[in-house]
Image (cartoon, grey):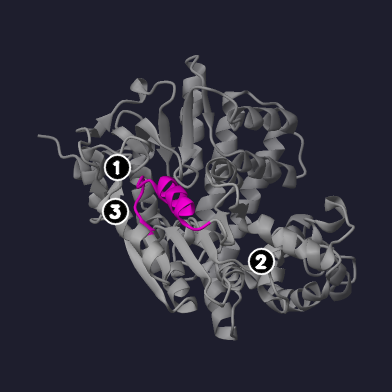
Amino acid sequence: MSYYKSSIFQQTIYDCVLNTNSNIIINAVAGSGKTSTLIALLNMIPANKKIIFIAFNREIMKELKRKAPSHVEVKTIHSFGLNECRFKYGRGKSNDEFIQHTKVQNHIMKYASIWFPSVGLPEDKFETKEELNSYLNTMEKLIDMFRMCLPQSPEEVQELIQKFDIRCYNGELEHAKEVFIELRKDKSCIDFIDMIYMPAIGDWRLKQYDYVLTDESQDFNRCQHAIIKKMVNPNGGRLIAVGDPYQAIYGFAGADQNSFNNLKTLFPNTVELPLSVCYRCDNAIIEHAQKIMPTILPRENAGSGYVGRGSVNNVKSGDFVLCRNTRPLVSLCMKYIAQGKKANIKGKDIGVNLINMVKATGKKGVEPIFNKLDADLNKLKVKTKVQYPLRPVEEVPIIGNMLDKIEAIRTISDTYKCKSADDIYTAINTIFSEDVDGIVLSTMHKSKGLESDNVYILDAHLLPSPWAKQQWEQEQERNLDYVARTRARKNLFYIEDYCSDQERNKDLQNCLDNMFPKN
């Protein structure tokens, strides 16, 4: 950002890098100019030092490659790990030979044919193929959990199972442990998680650096911590980690909510420095964000800005509409399309998940598809009630997530008057296309890193989620609220004249009345 001068916080960081030997954790608030600060740091470090910047995703990697000095390596942690794995085990192999995304599934099925007599389809164990698939999916979740979170004891395993709401009904945990042991021995190919897991736990030396810079460090898991530790040269190498604990929102995907503190443990000679000035948001938005994070500060000469009620009819091309859940976004997107407005929902992977959900039913007709989805939901409710007898089934996250997806699919199907599964696939791909200009709708999770002059919050009463019962879940919901509030540069509107669920309209109005009391 070229319109601001270095703040006292930035100067303190620069001095620490240039005049000390400490590792540094930069606690950077939303919109604080992280990228500009990091580029400045990279230009200050002598060119004869080995430097790598670990970007959060490929988009950020591409941006930093354009801006960083030519002697600085810029990679995602997965691309770094892939290079190390290829050097160790994959020389001479093509990507198709070495990267097998079905590696875990293949090992599970090999063992399923041993555990059960009918090659994974035991009539005495599972009534349907869908129940078998649920069993196999649970196995995959457990194995991914072992690799990402590196549990050190049976007690930690049980804590993680509870944290991630993994349902073990049919011996999945013991079976997953067996598969996991064999999986570790298989060096013939790797999958996405192996790209980090194998270098992290392998007894082999990784490429080491004098300076390792990391972004979005609040969302690291234990496996990522381990590989970063091995990247920093033990003889004088330094870690510079940037992140914001108040933007930690990926705990459900394995991120460690104590990532910052764990980095300090791994790197004892560490100082934590703030980057507290937000250069993105005007004053009213900063004041609104301060209700969650008091330390965020406005830039000098920031505009007044606006936070308050807004109308769904005032949303225009280029504006963002954010929501906690997917289904309300689908409903509103359909409304805009019917009005002749260009609109799309960010997140092609969400669309893929919805399509896979329809395909898993094995049905071609629309009515049989929804009958099967409703039946699967009811079966899951019964099993969930057994596992959580003291908790209303509607408040268990996995039930709410499944219901949200089913209703999203139903809304799309009804709006586009779909007559077959293929029609539903086409409609979903149309809605979740990121190539369309116009109004951008996004879940709050997908909005991270985005910004717009005008941001609208849809169905504000859905945040925090009623499913968030554990302390870490409640903290992540707070963080999600903070992320949403700080996407707006000038104006933040809470939509008051549209509720995706009319039965919950009273909840929406009460929420807005508490936030913005009427005179």
Q: Is residue 95 left or right of residue 50?
A: right
Pointer 2: what residue? 144
Could you tell me how far apart the alpha carbons at marks 3 and 2 are, in whole angstroms? Answer: 35 Å
Could you say where residue 230 lies in the image, as x and y percent from the top left? 61, 73
Q: Earlier in the sequence, mark 3 or mark 2?
A: 2
**Kind of residue at disc 3:** Ser
Image quadrant where one finds the N terminus: top left
Front in this rendered view, residue 438 or 370:
438
Marks 3 & 2, CB-CB < 8 Å contact: no
Residue 494 screen position, x and y as percent: 30, 35
The mark that comes first in sequence, 1 or 3, is 1
Do residues under tags 2 and 1 come within 8 Å of each other at their CB atoms? Answer: no
Mark yes or no: residue 122 visible: no
Q: Is residue 64 shown left or right of residue 456?
A: right
317 shown above or below 502? above
Residue at the image point whose x is 69% and y is 62% from the top: 81
Give the mark toward the camera: 2 or 1.
1
Tag of residue 357: none
Residue type at mark 1 is Lys
Nearer mark to the viewer, of 3 and 2: 3
> Which residue has dot 3 on it?
276
Residue 233 position, x and y percent, is: 58, 73
> Where is residue 352, by image quadrant?
top right
Q: CA distance from mark 1 to mark 3?
A: 14 Å
